[in-house]
Amino acid sequence: MAPSAPSMWLGCRFVTTVLLIRHGRTRANSQGILAGRLPGVLLDGVGRTQVRSLAGRLREVPIDEIAHSPLERCVETALGLAGARRTPVPLHPDPRLLECDYGQWTGQKLAELATQPLWDTVQRQPSAVVFPGGESMVEMADRAVSAVRDARTRHPGGVVAVVSHGDVIKAILSDALGQPLDAFQRIAVAPGSVSVVAYGPHRPTVLRMNETGGRMRLHGSAAAPTVGGGAG
């Protein structure tokens, strides 16, 4: 497979660039509700505007695939990005990019969850968290990282957009930074934001994090600007 132009970004044709995109804002985000995997959670007006803006920023970036969570808000975001492309780009739904299964916490207000004993562990030691009736944060992180790894394998030397959720993207970024999952709450990932990781032959390089404005260009040097993810 011929590498896309951005594969030379770090001077190596084996670099795969991954754009980590959080879905646009939803009403659950604005109301402080942990939507989790609830069905029918769609982008609100602000979220649709964020997706249109992001699609414009990425219009000149050659993208080989848009992998995405199957939840509606991510499907809407992925379709919005794909629809703005000058040439078709394949969509790849991947259940490993689903939001964390928050179990009994799903659909509850974050302000109320903050009073639960488990909340402090979520903030201080995510690696020890298993949501009641749901999954562990370690399981979420492992499946998300494996989804990105497989996307890179499908498009070596190319550019892959990954549309997912706040905690999922924070876990992927933590892995790319080489930091423990317990530090992932130090990362902010706003709705409609994009983070960029270049995966080279030796290690990943995190080039951008939580960007919500400005035209995106995938060339230049490696010195380019630098529970639920929140509402941003």
Image (cartoon, rainbow, N blue to C red):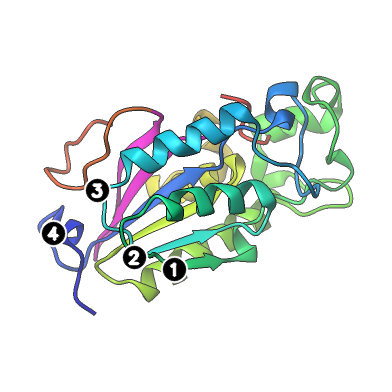
Residue 8, numbered circle: 4
Q: Which residue is mark 3?
A: 60
Report the span colored magenta: 189-212
What's the residue type where badge 1 is placed?
Pro
Query: Three-letter amino acid code at disc 2?
Result: Asp
Residue 197 higher or lower than 166, as above or below: below
| Magenta region includes residue 206 | yes
In the image, 32: left or right of 113? left
Quarter of the image for the N terminus: give it: bottom left
Residue 164 in the image, given as x and y percentages of width and height: 56, 49
**Label 3: few (<14), some or many (≥20) within 10 Å?**
some
Q: How many marks do you count on the picture?
A: 4
Q: Nearer the viewer, mark 1 or mark 4?
A: 1
Mark whose residue sits in front, 3 or 2: 3
Q: Position of residue 17 (x, y in %)?
A: 30, 56
Please give the label number shown on residue 90. 1
Would you say 126 lies left or right of 144 here? right
In primary-sequence order, the first of circles 2 and 1 is 2
In percent of width and height, residue 115 lies at 85, 21
Q: Residue at x 68, y 51 (%)?
A: 72
User: Residue 88 occupies which quadrant of the picture?
Assistant: bottom left
Residue 180 visible in the shown view: no
- Which label is found at residue 64? 2
217 left or right of 131 in image = left
Which label's residue is closer to the chain start, 3 or 1? Answer: 3
Q: Is residue 92 depicted above or below 219 in this figure?
A: below
Q: Is residue 207 above or below residue 49?
A: below
- Helix, strand or loop at label 3? It is loop
